[in-house]
Image (cartoon, helix red, strand yellow):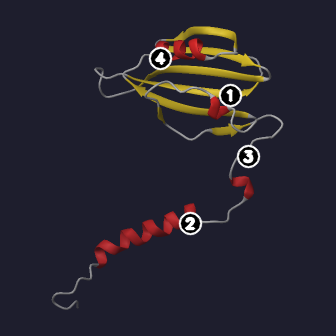
Amino acid sequence: MARAGSSRRPGILAPFTILAAVLLVACGPGGSPQAQPSPDATVFRGGDFDQLPRYPRSETLNQPTEKAGIVVQTFSVPNAAPQTILQYYADRLDGWQVIEAVRAVGPDAYRGAWVKGDRQLLVSGGLAPTLSQDRPVAQYSLELGPVRPVP
């Protein structure tokens, strides 16, 4: 039985102890080298993806992921139209050659593709589902990798 005036609260500490253990395991050192993707140095040149412009007010939805030499990252932009975002890229990709002009690929969905040297950039965007029709949210993805057929 707890003494009067005791500050011990076992019901509150248990969830925090469990959370701390989970975070320690998830973020701790060690782990397999295969657990994290690593770009093939012959395909992906560090910094290429970071040099791509970002549409103003873009919010990152995920960290860049890499698979088979293709790096992808997705963003959201409140109060933006997908077509406007794609046009932004069409206007700002200096030195990139258009291999697929910006075009509609579905209702409120657009795509465009560019190439520069041995690198290809595919930009696609659409409206994100939201609870409010008054404040549309656009999502777009940047996909950078070796030159390949456009899907």
Residue drawn at the location 53% of the way across and 67% of the way down:
24
Locate residue 131: give its quadrant: top left
Q: Quadrant of the C terminus?
A: top right
Residue drawn at the location 37% of the way across and 68% of the way down:
15
Q: Secondary structure at mark 1?
A: strand
Q: How many residues crowd around disc 4 within 10 Å: few (fewer than 14), some, or many (20 or more)?
A: many
Label number found at residue 82? 4
Callout 4, which amino acid?
Answer: Pro
Locate residue 122: give its quadrant: top right
Label number found at residue 28? none
**Residue 141 in the image: above or below residue 12:** above
Q: Pointer 2: what residue?
A: 25
**Residue 20 in the image: above or below residue 145:** below
Callout 1, which amino acid?
Answer: Leu
Question: Separation of disc 3 and disc 2 at Cα?
Answer: 22 Å
114 to the left or right of 40: left
**Residue 60 in the image: above or below residue 121:** below
Question: Separation of disc 2 and disc 1 at Cα?
Answer: 32 Å
Q: Secondary structure at mark 3?
A: loop
Callout 2, which amino acid?
Answer: Val
Q: How many residues crowd around disc 2 within 10 Å: few (fewer than 14), some, or many (20 or more)?
A: few
Q: Pointer 3: what residue?
A: 38
48 to the left or right of 18: right
Give the x, y percent position of residue 3. Answer: 19, 91
Q: Earlier in the sequence, mark 3 or mark 4?
A: 3
Q: Earlier in the sequence, mark 2 or mark 4?
A: 2
Asked whether disc 3 touches disc 4, contact meaning CB atoms under 8 Å apart, the reply is no
Label number found at residue 144? 1
Q: Earlier in the sequence, mark 3 or mark 2?
A: 2
Q: Nearer the viewer, mark 2 or mark 4?
A: 4
